[in-house]
Amino acid sequence: MRHLTSVEPIVIKRIAVVSVLWILLVLCLSARAEEPAGEEVRKLKEKVDSLEGRVKELESEKEKPPAAAADAEGGKNSLIDKVLNKESIEKALGLRFGGSVDTIYTWNFGQPADGRNAQRVFDARDNSFGLNLAELYIERPADKPGTAGFRVDLDFGLDPQVFQAAGFNDGDNFELEQAYVVWNAPLGNGLVIKAGKFTSMHGYEVIESVDNMNTSRSILFGYAVPGTHTGIMATYKFCDAFSATAGVLNGWDNVVDNNRGKSVQAAVTLTLGDIFTATASAMYGPEQNNDSRKDRFLLDIVATLTPVKWLTIGYNGDLAHEDDAAIGIRSGQDADWYGSALYAKVEFLEYFYVAARGEIFVDEDGSRLGVLGQTTWESTATLSCRPLKELEFRLEYRHDDSNRLVYSTRGGAGLSHHQNTVSLEVLFRF
């Protein structure tokens, strides 16, 4: 008993010491195990604090006035930039302005002796660089009922010699393409009344190359329809899908009327969103010099289909009749002309597109092309590249064909039924 009694306290003490040491070891190890987690929490807290600080900085930047924000960005929106900025000027003056420059080189494989591409419109010069058109326009639109505005288009270059309206600046390299006043009368959805000189609503193509698919113009554009009018027109949009236009004009491509009669025109337009648009227009009136009794009639159909964003399909059809307008052995008889054109444009890679056009034009009485019994065909392919938003290059190949010998050949040795040309066009728009 005595032995056991003497040993027991020692054992108990040792057990107690070991237990305390064990507990301390466990606590120490636990503390070290939790240290990385605590460090992680600390680092996360620092990141959150940093992000909160950045948010406050951004909020304070947002509240800065424009001038202060510009200074913070190194003066990107300086006073000079604002003064020279087109959008700022337009907004300040309530005006819109812009224009384009169109230059071209055309090569005719037939090398005509007279240096001319027969029965062509603006691209009529062979083996020659040319400044087709330099245009500047300014306008104040009348977008809302109860507002008024105007538009003026100034054109310089070789093209104005072709589309100049009779009675104004004949033969010069300058043309006042448009100059009109517009009033959006507060009647219903707004009755838009336009008075002055303006481009024609007939035809699929327009005077400015930058607004067409192809470089060259169609035969229909050059010979089947007018280019400009002087008079008064009114357009009313009944709804988003339907609008109508009517007007009284001096006639085809003239500022000063060439007789005492007036021409009238009307059109209806159907629009189905961004997918389909079609316009049927007609014009009727006397167009011959000093003769108000011989009338000309034109029916023009234009349609555009855009089934997908990158594809555009267009159609243009014309039918016309004029009293006592035939030539040659048919002189004294009435004249008829008609034709159709089909267009397609495929856009890809954002900076490129390819376009194609095919058309036929019949002028049996020679009143438009100047050759009796002529039927012409043409097919055109155009490749466009836009390395910059403002800059465009176009390469075009065109084949013309006729049932008559109308195309001059090399050295003037004879005439041909066909004509082939290639063109390089450089365009700048602003």
Image: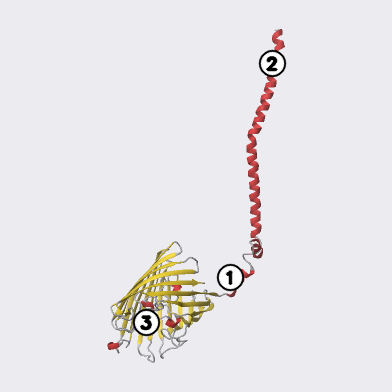
Amino acid type at mark 1: Asn
For the image shown, how many numbered marks are present on the structure? Answer: 3
* Spot occupied by residue 111 in the image (x, y as percentages of width and height): 35, 77
Label located before the other in sequence (3 or 2): 2
Vertical comparison of 140 with 64: above or below: below
- In this figure, which residue is indicated by the disc labeled 1? 85
Vertical comparison of 4 with 29: above or below: above
Between disc 1 and disc 3, the foreground one is 3
Q: Nearer the viewer, residue 427 or 258?
A: 427
Amino acid type at mark 3: Asp
* Spot occupied by residue 27 in the image (x, y as percentages of width and height): 66, 29
Q: Residues within 10 Å of mark 2 (few under 14, many from 20)?
A: few
Q: Nearer the viewer, residue 222 or 145?
A: 222
Residue at the far top: name it.
1
Q: Say what secondary structure mark 2 lies in.
A: helix
Q: CA distance from mark 1 to mark 2?
A: 96 Å
Residue 418 in view, yes or no: yes
- In this figure, which residue is indicated by the disc labeled 3? 114
